[in-house]
Amino acid sequence: MEILVVVAHPNPGSFNRAIADTAVAAARRCGHEAVLHDLYEEKFDPLLQPAELSKNAKLDPSIARHCADLTSADGIVIVHPNWWGQPPAILKGWLDRVVRQGVAYEFRTGPNGEGQSVGLLKMQTALVVTTANTPAEVELKVYGDPLENLWKTCVFGLCGIPRAHRLAFTPVIVSTPEQRAQWLREVSEKMQNLFPPAGG
């Protein structure tokens, strides 16, 4: 099984990167191949170019590689901080350029002539791990949870991934080393549950 892990945080020593590394290690312990893309480390360009808009556009080699990793993956893990109720801009750009029509989904004509979206990804399971500094109860009461809908419905639902899971760790800014260690254990356990060893 191939697991794609995508992390978006500008600090290479961030807790987000620790989460991504933990996910990669857990996948490999279960005998899976893990492909890691740290978007900031790679200096991923989030700007969708006009020439890329067409479904059949010739893609930059770096974008084509990301698309190939996405389509070959049997599962995906996305790790990012909650900034203004959204992913960082670099990750939104990754969605725009990589999770594209003809790669992750396409539009077809329905039986009554209406447009229908059809997911193209083969993976069955996705995990999103987010971090924030607002206490969870405040986040839900004051802001709602826009990330839940973004990932589970707008992204994974459109792309045909039936099982989407989320871990939300907060508040990170006042967390202790012990709390962070516990959160990383939760990531390892979740990975093992979602992507168990073959025959396990």
Image (tube, rainbow, N blue to C red):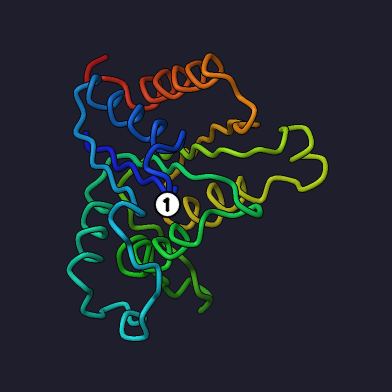
Looking at the rendering, which quadrant does residue 179 occupy? top right
Q: Position of residue 167 (x, y in %)?
A: 54, 32
Q: Position of 44 compared to 131: left or right?
A: left
Whether 100 is drawn above or below 23: the answer is: below
The foreground one among 121 and 12 is 12
The foreground one among 141 and 83 is 83
The image quadrant where one finds the N terminus is: top left
Q: Residue at x 28, y 40 (%)?
A: 74
Q: Residue at x 51, y 79 (%)?
A: 113
Residue ID for mark 1: 160
The image quadrant where one finds the C terminus is: top left
Q: Position of residue 32 (x, y in %)?
A: 21, 29
Task: Determine the secondary structure under disc 1.
Answer: loop
Task: Name the residue furthest right.
Answer: 141
Q: Position of 148 compared to 6: left or right?
A: right
The foreground one among 55 and 43 is 43
Q: Residue at x 32, y 48 (%)?
A: 38
Looking at the rendering, which quadrant does residue 19 occupy? top left
Whether 141 is drawn above or below 68: the answer is: above
Q: Residue at x 31, y 60 (%)?
A: 43
The amino acid type of the residue labelled 1 equals Gly
Q: How many marks?
A: 1
Whether 9 is drawn above or below 109: the answer is: above
Q: Position of residue 185 (x, y in %)?
A: 44, 17
Task: Name the residue furthest bottom.
Answer: 50
The foreground one among 75 and 108 is 75
Q: Residues within 10 Å of mark 1 (few under 14, many from 20)?
A: many
Q: Position of residue 141 (x, y in %)?
A: 82, 40
